[in-house]
Amino acid sequence: MSTLEFLVSLPLIAALAIALGAPARCTALGASVLVFLTTIYCAINYNTSIEDFAAWQFESARTVLDMPGIPTISLAFGLDGISVVLILLSSIVLLAAVLAAPDESKVQGNSRLYYLSLLLIGGGALGAFTATDLFFFYAFHELALIPTFLMIGLFGRGENRIRTAWTITIFLSVGSLILLVGLILLVIKLGAQTFAIADLIALAQGQGIDAASQNWIFLLLLVGFGTLVSLFPFHSWAAPAYAEAPTPVTMLHAGVLKKFGLYGLIRIALPIVPDGFQHWLHLLLILLIGNILFIGLVTIAQRSLDRMLGFSSVMHMGYIFLGIAAFNTMGVSGAVLLMFAHGLSIAALFALNGALRDRFGDLTFRRFGKLGKSLPRLGLLFGFATFAAIGLPGFANFAAEIPIYFGAFDGDASGMNWLRWATVGALWGVVISAVYLLRAYRSIFMGNAPKVRLDDAPDMLLREMLPVILLIAGLLIVGFSPEVLNQYIRPTVNGLFLLSAG
Amino acid sequence: MNPDTLTWLILLLPLLSAATIVVGIGRWSNLSALVSTGTAFLSLVFSVMLATNGEAVASIAYPWIDLSPSFQVNIGFTLDKLALGMMLIVSSIGFLVHLFSLGYMRDDSGKSRYFAGLSLFLFSMSGIVLADNFVMMFIFWELVGVSSYILIGHWYEKNSAAEAGKKAFLVNRIGDFGFMTGILLVWILTGSIYFKEIAQAVGGVANAGLLNAAVLCVFAGAVGKSAQVPLHVWLPDAMEGPTPVSALIHAATMVAAGVYMLARVSFLVDASAVAGTTIAWVGAITALLAALMALQQDDIKRVLAYSTLSQLGYMVMAQGLGSAGADAGMFHLYTHAFFKALLFLGSGAVIYACHHEQDIWRMGGLRKRMPITFWTFALGTAALIAVPFTSGFWSKEAILEALLQQKMHGPYAVGIIVAFLTPFYMTRLVLVAFFGPSRTKEAEHAREVEPVMWIPLALLAVMAVFSAYRFLAAPLVAAGHADFGHFFSHFGLTATLSLVGLVGGVAGAWFLYRTAQKDPISIPLFRDKFRIDELYLFFVDKIQDGLARGLTRLDRDVIDPLIARFPAALSLAGGSVSRALQTGNVQTYAFLFGLGVVALLYFVL
């Protein structure tokens, strides 16, 4: 069994063990610690001197289906610099999510199913980010989505949870189906005999796909992947789902699983249908500005913390799209780093959101005030997470946004163009983010005490703080020294653009 | 120690102090205060050592973002006169304010947080001063913003303090929106983010229109940080913070960062005449409007806050001249830092002695009860109103001279008018607060403050009078110094007008306020700060939040149904999916969905 097979199957085996009767929280924690250590092992032993995109390391492959007439499907795994960053993201957030999950006795309902689902989501995400075969790339993501839907329906909060579960299910399934059509068309048009992503890219480098088909395929991929990432206007599933899902599920989906669509655009769309990408660039820019400015303003109008965070996570996707739209090393590198940074910061914010909900239930801003006094630890951690999300220097988010802005601005000095105007819009979005996050912080933790007394709630326990500290530490380390991750991203993204140059 | 080691120590020690307090020793508030003050002292010592070394080239840069070959951002240092001088201002006033705070914040329940904030500020401010490139400057620019947010909102349980901190951060963010845009524009025009390389490349820029835009956008950053009109609204509210903070951050150093930045990039201002003129006029308008607002304020700190705005206006005017005015502006920044810190700490002593009373009409008679505070405050006032041969006099002359020489007649005229207004409102303040009978019990019971608080006042008073003279200005690497020979040989229009302004202003206020028990004049427009805050409030409440609510409705009632119904119809049309929908069971659906995926693959291929 190869390292990556071990990594991906670990959470799945642990999930099976829980189903068969192993103690749920213990097993889940053990598995996620092991997953974390394994990803660290992979990162340390990854050779960063290879400047190539989709040049897999830790490679392994087992042929699953080899029938004449259809492309060979194989269960193949491998890592390049981008996937290293994403498995680190997955394992850190998985660990934090399991840590933040309630004790078995406090789960309302079947606690085995609860923990088992978390592991399935984590395992699915790890599989999707390490699969080097298009079939499994897709299948692992689906594997992670299904328990997400289940968890919202079974363990979600509020009376609307079934409705919400249906909304996200239909949205993401339809998105996935559109994506599937796009992927299938892509394989057919390439005339590929295999689903191996590296082979598909190589084929695209040769004859490639004609411009007209590229345009269609890219549009399908953009809508498909885009729906999964809550690209405007395919976003309305996100805020209610994140507000009503159990805390660890929101952490995993908003933090990790949602990044699949962005990963897919970089992994598949950019190298294989670059002309289609150029064709739809203006559309993409308009949509991502929709994410940043339109949804940014919608976020300002939210009256409760959970929904505000949900919309803010939709909004911040616009920045990652902007990095991709820049289509150069700076922009795409920044986009990959921002996937990591956003994943950690939104997970931290939702963990804290969960801690507040456990104490006070309803999270309407108006109810709160002065909590900094009675809950200083929660206030401090919330402050850190808030400033990370605002993009304060020192946190990873800022270190990722800077190359995105520069990447999107790159070019000659003849004047402004679409990309540059979109960047200016994105910069205004930074002001918007600060408006809603600081308003939230102010109304919850600062100012006069509210009429209804809230100051008898206990401050955070170490057990609750641990996942948040883990996430914030990650953000600070990468923020102070982005090279920790850029060393992986740089050679791979440089490789991607060597491809398109060649 | 070599300059590299010194610089890194100056930068990192305060960060270490802040981190230690947050992570470890925060629960022991006296220890935290001591650690923070100790680091501030070390920072001062190392800054002095660095200045003694003289100009140097820093060789060790930390590669922060490395996306070579296309993009690289280093944390590296500039150690020229400008930086060394500014570093001395920051660290010396920083240390004195730490010292003063040991007394002022003695019994505060959030003392650890307060000192952590001060340390974080010192770290951030040092970063701005030492930066050798735009991105690094922007990084620390944002960080001083957050330390200012923390310190303004120190008494966060008060609604007014909570609002003021938020307002300061957000208004600055608006300026930084322009700043970052400007940095990006400069980058595409010159191909660099490093000051040295930009200075070399800027001459070859062909696209003059874009260059004007770039410089004006960069200037927007200074408008925010240095509180120039129209982004000045945050500074008066920032007085909600503890008074030592007002002295250090909102008078002497952070608000001067915009001026410092403009001096750092004066070659950019030189390259764009349009931007230069705009900058000078923005400074002039700020100087005038702020002085007018100061005439009618009753809160001792607010008077000083508006006078800070007004003096910053002078400095910005000078920076509008580009390299021709950069030295004059920096010279005024230098003298102002000391005398304004003195005035704020003095007002802090008064407020402390009067049990947190800030209304000057509820004071009176403090001259006898707090003699040290009074005399030091008087010397600070003398420097601010430019009494001949005090420090403020020399630097203000330098700015007015430079404006006249560069034929900026409009801003020059405004500068002269402000030179009349400043003595007027400051004389009013001193007369009402320190002279006459005590008007309240608090003022009657006021006593002189303890040595840890008055020693900084005394030291700063010495600086207020003498800092412009060569024996202090030269070792402190100031951008200018007093020059009697030049002054008397060139005695002319500027000197005459500003002396007339001084005498007129003091005499007018003396006449009106010597025995006044309440304000004899009332100008609502000035008192209400030209209603600019109301204008912003309208914009935020009605336009921004209104738009936000409107878009939310649009999102919920139009976009969601449009996007959701279409795929819903689509999925109903599909075979397996519609069956799942009919059973209404999520698990069934999930199972079928997985099957469907596989099946679809088989059929299609």
Image (cartoon, rainbow, N blue to C red):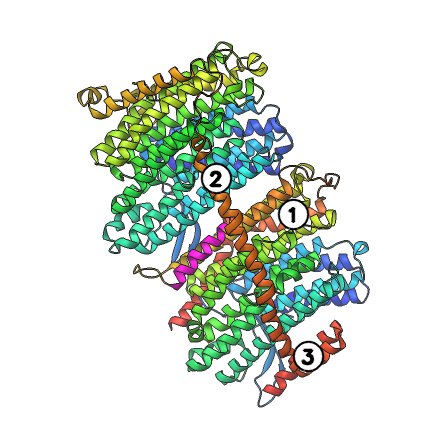
Q: Which residue is mark 2?
A: B533
User: Residue B92 got which mark?
Assistant: none
Instruction: State the CA–CA distance, disc 1 to disc 3.
Output: 39 Å
Q: Position of residue A483 (x, y in %)?
A: 48, 53
Q: Which residue is mark 3?
A: B577
Q: Nearer the viewer, residue A144 or B75?
A: A144
Is residue A320 shown in magenta? Answer: no
* Whole-percent x, y for residue B194 in the image: 34, 48
The answer to whether residue B461 is above or below residue B229 is: above
The answer to whether marks 3 and 2 sit on the same chain is yes
Q: Amino acid at mark 2?
A: Asp
* Chain letter belonging to callout 1: A
Q: Taking the image as drawn, is residue B496 in sight?
A: yes
Numbered disc total: 3
Eyeballing the image, is A180 above or below B267? below
Residue kind at label 3, given as amino acid type: Val
Q: Is residue B94 visible?
A: no
Q: Nearer the viewer, mark 3 or mark 2?
A: 2
Label 3 chain ID: B
Q: At 36% across and 48% down in the image, what residue appears?
A: B217
Q: Read off the chain for label 2.
A: B
Q: Quadrant of residue A312?
A: bottom right
**What residue is shown with label 1?**
A365
Q: How far apart are labels 3 and 2 at the CA level?
A: 57 Å
